Image (spheres, rainbow, N blue to C red):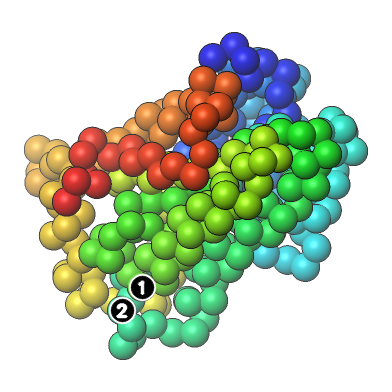
Amino acid sequence: MSNIQNRVIVVTGCSSGIGLATARLFLERQAIVFGIDVGAVPQKLADTHSTFTFHQADLTSDQAVEHAIAKCIGKHNRIDVLVNCAGVSDGWSSADTIQDEEWERVICINLTVPIRMMRAVLPAMKEQKGGSIINVASKAGVSGASAGIAYTSSKHGLVGATKNVAWRFHTDNIRCNAVLPGGVATNIASSVQMEHFDSAGFNSFFPTVQLHVSKDSEGTPVPVIGVDDVARGIAFLASDDAKMINGALIPIDNAWSTI
């Protein structure tokens, strides 16, 4: 996929998990990556790749999205690809237990911020007559039985936004697709605010999750999908090899999506 060489790619959540793997893969394929994260700079990427720029920001803050995209365009004069990867998990809360604070946090980070990011990059993509947006959704974007209500709603919303943007801008040569990872070994579990953990909700949904994961020698559930598996799917959708793929939802879950 050499056709992503020298393309300017924005990756949110670049300091860990799928975002880090995606940024690293794009850099290895000689793209120019503008990484955004609320956390610390991924130092190895910064030390190894001169084509990597890091921007630390809390994208939920007022004007943070607009400032980040302005900085990227100011440095590179264009944006070819946006990867909305940053996200948080919920505490498995259901409609009868969800608290406003948890709902608003998860919806803002997982849905509002990606929509703001798309709004911010679309003018540049329209002007340059092309671009690719990849949203990292989830199995929970098409299922009601694999996460709590906040995470499920946020990812369903992101799926809808993906389809809407794909159709609205398809005549501008702008593509918008989503990957739907299954369970992946990342640090997203650390984003759960345990004061909102709903054990009854967890016990209801987790049997569905167990159909997808393997177990280690002690019987502990272990995800079978790696961050690099998801990164390769994202890179494909960003490339010209996927130039007629628009509005698609690509499961990366070893057939979990079939149930």
The one of 95 and 179 positioned closer to us in this rendering: 179
Farthest front residue?
171
Query: Which residue appears at 30% of the width and 46% of the height?
Result: 183
Percent x, y of residue 237: 51, 31
As shown in the figure, which amino acid type bears the numbered disc 1?
A: Ile
**Can you tell which quarter of the image residue 232 is in?**
top left
Question: In the picture provided, is 45 more to the left or to the right than 111?
Answer: right
The one of 136 and 207 positioned closer to us in this rendering: 136
The image shows residue 105, relative to residue 243, as above or below, that is below
Farthest right residue?
74
**Residue 43 in view, yes or no:** yes
Percent x, y of residue 42: 62, 35
Farthest top residue?
2
**Residue 87 in view, yes or no:** no
Label 1 CA crowd tier, 10 Å (few <14, some 14–19, many 20+): many
The image shows residue 250, relative to residue 165, as above or below, that is above
Query: Which residue appears at 80% of the width and 55% of the height?
Result: 66
Measured in 3D between alpha carbons, the distance from the residue under mark 1 to the one under mark 2, in whole angstroms, is: 5 Å
**Can you tell which quarter of the image residue 40 is in?**
top right
Question: In the picture provided, is 217 more to the left or to the right than 212?
Answer: left
The image shows residue 159, relative to residue 236, as above or below, that is below
Q: Which residue is mark 1?
A: 149
The one of 47 and 100 positioned closer to us in this rendering: 100
Numbered label attached to residue 94: 2
Question: In the picture provided, is 52 more to the left or to the right than 156?
Answer: right
Query: Which residue appears at 13% of the width and 49% of the height?
Result: 211
As shown in the figure, which amino acid type bears the numbered disc 2?
A: Ser
Provide the secondary structure element on which disc 2 rests: loop
Provide the secondary structure element on which disc 1 rests: helix
